[in-house]
Amino acid sequence: MRVGIIGANGQLGADLVKAFIGHEVTAWTRNDFDVRDRKRVLATVIDTNPHIVVNTAAFHNTDACEGNASLAFEVNAVGSRNVAQACQACGGLLVHISTDYVFDGQKTEPYTEDDRPNPLNVYGTSKLAGEHLSASICARYYIIRVSALFGTTGGSSKINFVERMLSKANAGETLTIVDDLVTSPTYTVDAASTIRGLIEAEVPSGTYHVTNAGACSWYRFAETILQEAGITADLRPTTIAALNPKARRPKYTALTSAKLGASGLSQLRSWRDALVEYLSVKRDEVLA
């Protein structure tokens, strides 16, 4: 099976490359093409002729998206359209990675795939547009919504929320973290494994939520990170209103899946268990 992974040097992309070991994987990064460049996307993907294209590329800095809506839509919507057109030209399966920020946060229990999206900000709106374009262009597709990703690669900035908390705590800094935004922290190793499972199970085209089980505020997530790492720090809760960011944030975007079990797949383990493994892997890397 030939698998093309776009954004292969990001947190999720890197673990997807590992998850598909044993298959013929082509790992594309920004150096290979920019998803906004339609001609380059079509030429590169069609030349490779993959059976599956996984698109993890995104402009995901929420406040930066708010200040540059045109770029957000060029990457997250138009770029997604370009990838979908290339995948459809190959007759392949498109796996499009989306976000919990397509929801407005008005619920008090986890969102399922059946809940109606209603984004509050440019980032969420541009990602929802990418979902619609992907689904309308590709005959075979999975829209995969994830949230609060943490992975050992660290993404384009080579650092994630877990590592930021540990770095600041070790430096003796005060950590002031929002306690009124609730999410589902998700380990990219688990997400990548489940995405492969969905593909191998040949589930029907549609939208799937792929997050570790459970929910917590960002403050609670930070508190648990420090506890599991055995680090004492000056950790203080705050509110999103006190931070006054450019973009509106949905208050509650925990996700769960109503469809994984129906497809014969297991729900992901708890976010806390996933965090414990992540920290263990990182410790082993340091000692190696």
Image (tube, helix red, strand yellow):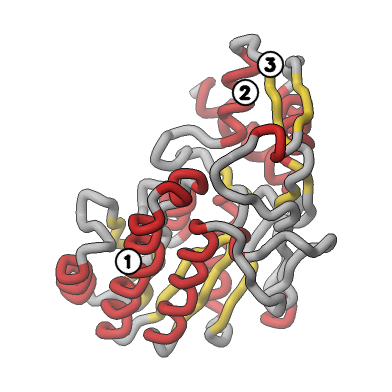
Which residue type does callout 1 highlight? Gly
Q: How crowded is mark 3: few (under 14 residues within 10 Å), some or many (20 or more)?
A: few
SS for callout 1: helix
Which residue type does callout 3 highlight? Thr
- In the figure, 277 relative to 74: above or below? above
- Specify the farthest residue to the right: 108
Given contact means CB atoms under 8 Å apart, are the residues at marks 2 and 3 in contact? no
- Seen from the viewer's position, the closer of residues 67 and 178 is 67
Which residue type does callout 2 highlight? Leu
**In which quadrant of the rendered view does residue 229 lie?**
top right
- In the figure, 10 relative to 87: above or below? above
Look at the image and tell me whether residue 219 can be seen: yes
From the image, which quarter does the N terminus lie in?
A: bottom left
Please state the horizontal and vertical placement of residue 207, each as a whole percent of the image: 58, 77
Q: How crowded is mark 1: few (under 14 residues within 10 Å), some or many (20 or more)?
A: many
Q: Earlier in the sequence, mark 2 or mark 3?
A: 2
Q: Which of marks 1 and 2 is nearer the N terminus?
A: 1
Q: Name the residue under label 1.
A: 79
- Specify the farthest residue to the bottom: 139
Which is in the foreground here, disc 2 or disc 3? Answer: 3
Which is in the foreground here, disc 1 or disc 2? Answer: 1
- In the figure, 56 relative to 217: above or below? below
Please state the horizontal and vertical placement of residue 93, each as a whole percent of the image: 40, 80
Residue at the image position 51 percent from the left and 77 percent from the top: 142
- Seen from the viewer's position, the closer of residues 8 and 112 is 112
SS for callout 2: helix
State the mark number for residue 166.
Answer: 2
Q: CA–CA distance between discs 3 and 1?
A: 39 Å
Please state the horizontal and vertical placement of residue 160, each as a whole percent of the image: 53, 36
Q: Earlier in the sequence, mark 3 or mark 1?
A: 1
State the mark number for residue 174.
Answer: 3
Q: CA–CA distance between discs 2 and 3?
A: 12 Å
